[in-house]
Amino acid sequence: MTAFQSLEKGALLVLNSGSSSVKFTVFAVEPAQNKIAPFFAGQLCEIGTDAKLTAKTEAGEKMAEESWADRDKGGVAPLLPHLISWIESRLPEGMPLLAAGHRVVHGGSGLHHPVMINEHLMKELESLIPLAPLHQPQNTAAIRVLSESRSELPQVACFDTAFHHTQPSTSTTYAIPRELTEAGIRRYGFHGLSYEYISRHLREEMPDLAEGRVVVAHLGNGSSLCALKNGRSYDTTMGFSVLEGVPMGTRCGNLDPGVIIHLMREYKMNVNDLEQLLYHKSGLLGMSGISNDMRALLSSDDPRAKEAVDIFCSRVAKEIARLACAMGGFDALIFTAGIGEHSAPIRSMVCKHLKWLGIELCEESNANRQSRISAENSLPVHVIPTNEELMIAQHTVDLLTMRNAA
Ligand code: ADP
């Protein structure tokens, strides 16, 4: 991280805007100590039906649990100025809001690093909407609303795709005609801010591993895995969209494209039907018919829940082997995100498939969620909590510092 003594003391707002929710984290910037620390966080959820604001301090004290239904005009955009005012009203004197950092799903083939927002860039981000029609419009709308309501506030966009720009074409190319590849139909990869955080963490805390070949399993509601070679992304499981790879909460993961042709031809499904099916009704929810939440499946006696969990673990293990193959072997496995960090049974079931690759867990360390959970004679397996928000805050501070220095 760059030194940022040139900044004034203040607060940074990190925003992750979805279609019916906005998650936010406010960080305190302490230039004298060169430190960014989480201050409070929360979310506006159920937007469009019955908006609710919840927020907690970093210490876990409740700051808000209130209905915003009377302000809810449908959609995130009209609520954002209220949210910013609410956040500012909670900042102590002498701690102005310095900037906002946004998680933006897609940076296309050209945006490889976080960028300061200006009108030219906004147009570029909006031109990428066709590549991520379910997420990019929410991200860009939030930036537009803030530009209009708080034009003086610097804003930074951080891309989920950017970290993967180091991948070779053997990882990014689909076997389709070259002109389609050149038109942008290629594998981009997502969850890049999470992998970047893990890569930095490895560099700081486990430098030996950072220089090796590491597979990171980001298993959450959305799940993907990444092959890190020398700290850089070499391959990943998500591709052109966030649908590719392992099954997720409600997304299908890898699916023979022939199935889509069949659904269109025989079931007369159109684009909207397919989008609903593959993004919202598949994955753990679709296979189990019970829930998209791993906790609910693990505690269910229903054989469909057990089968969905088994399929998930088997598919994650197969992707670990595939990514190891892409790198010519691997030196460590890292679990992160909601399931990866909190579910010992899933980590255990995944690793049971990988004994032949030299992976074996110490079940006691796994159950107690130690940092290293592998048995002594195994390849190292670690649990590292990810922090995409901190990554966005760091990028935002870096860009503000560079702007001040220019
Ligand atoms: P997102 O992709 O929305 O950021 P998270 O990384 O927060 O998701 O992961 C959320 C998911 O993590 C939940 O849907 C739940 O299935 C899973 N999860 C959280 N805690 C546990 C747990 N203790 N055991 C199993 N699964 C868990």
Image: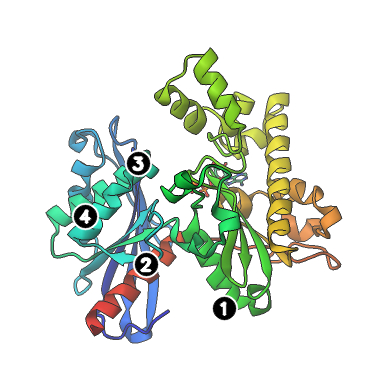
Left or right, residue 73 beside residue 271: left
The label on residue 393 is 2
Q: CA distance from mark 3 to mark 1?
A: 38 Å
Q: Position of residue 381 (x, y in %)?
A: 72, 62
For marks 4 and 2, the one nearer the N-term is: 4
For marks 4 and 3, the one nearer the N-term is: 4
> Circle 4 sits on which residue?
84
Amino acid type at mark 1: Glu
Q: CA distance from mark 4 to mark 3?
A: 29 Å
Q: Quadrant of ligand 1?
A: top right
Residue positioned 68% across, 55% down in the render:
323
Q: Position of residue 65 (x, y in %)?
A: 33, 44
Residue positioned 73% across, 25% down in the render:
303
Q: Residues within 10 Å of mark 1 (few under 14, many from 20)?
A: few
Residue 10 image-quadrant placement: bottom left
> Circle 1 sits on which residue?
204
Q: Report helix, strand or loop for mark 3.
A: helix
Nearest to the eye among marks 3 and 2: give it.
3
The reply to whether callout 4 and callout 3 are in contact (CB within 8 Å) is no
For the C terminus, the quadrant is bottom left
Q: Report helix, strand or loop for mark 1.
A: helix
Q: CA distance from mark 4 to mark 2?
A: 17 Å
> Circle 3 sits on which residue?
130
